[in-house]
Amino acid sequence: MYVAPGNAGTALEDGLENIELHSVDELLAFALREHVYLTVVGPEAPLAAGVVDAFRAAGLKIFGPTKLAANWKVPKISPKHHAAAPYPTALYQPSLLH
C-alpha cells in the first residue's frame, strides 16, 4: 500500500510505502504505472487540485469529492460572531480570503 506523501508515522508501518509525490500529474502517472486498484484521498490539497477528476477521467477507481465539491466551502466565521451572550473574548476580524 502506498501513502503519498506519507509521514514519519506511516514510514514505520509494515506494508506501507511512502512516496514523495504531490502534484495531480505525478500521482496519476504513478497510479497508472503501478496499476493501483483503488485510491483513497485524505489530504485536502490534492482534492482541491482535482485529483479525483483526473483519476476518473483516466478510468481509475478513486474515493473522494470532485474538485468542484472539494473547493465549495461555506465561509467559516468565528463562533464569537454568533455568540448571544456578551462574553469578553480576544478581538478578531472575519476574512473571506482562503
Image (cartoon, helix red, strand yellow):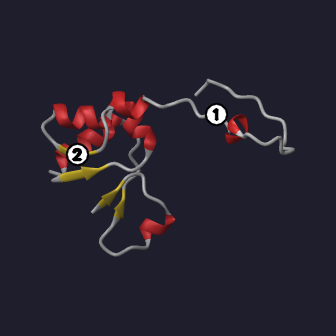
Which residue, given by chain and number where applicable, does mark 2 sit on? 62
Front residue (pair 73, 28): 73
How far is disc 2 from disc 1 in space, using C-alphas?
32 Å
Which residue sits furthest bottom?
A: 14
Q: Is residue 21 left or right of residue 89?
A: left
Indicate the quadrant where residue 83 lies.
top right
Q: Identify which residue is drawn at 14% across, 51% down.
A: 35
Numbered tag placed on residue 77 in the rendering: 1
Residue under the point 43% across and 67% down: 11
Which circle's residue, 2 or 1, is located before the other in the chain?
A: 2
Q: Image quarter for residue 50? A: top left
Q: In front here: 85 or 90?
A: 85
Q: Is residue 1 left or right of residue 69?
A: left
Q: Would residue 56 be found to the left or right of residue 16 on screen?
A: left
Label 2, residues with CA under 10 Å away: few <14, some 14-19, many ≥20 = some
Secondary structure of the residue carrying tag 1 is: loop
Looking at the rendered structure, the secondary structure element under dot 2 is strand
The three-letter code of the residue at mark 2 reads Ile
* Near-viewer residue (59 or 18): 59
Mark 1 residue type = Ile
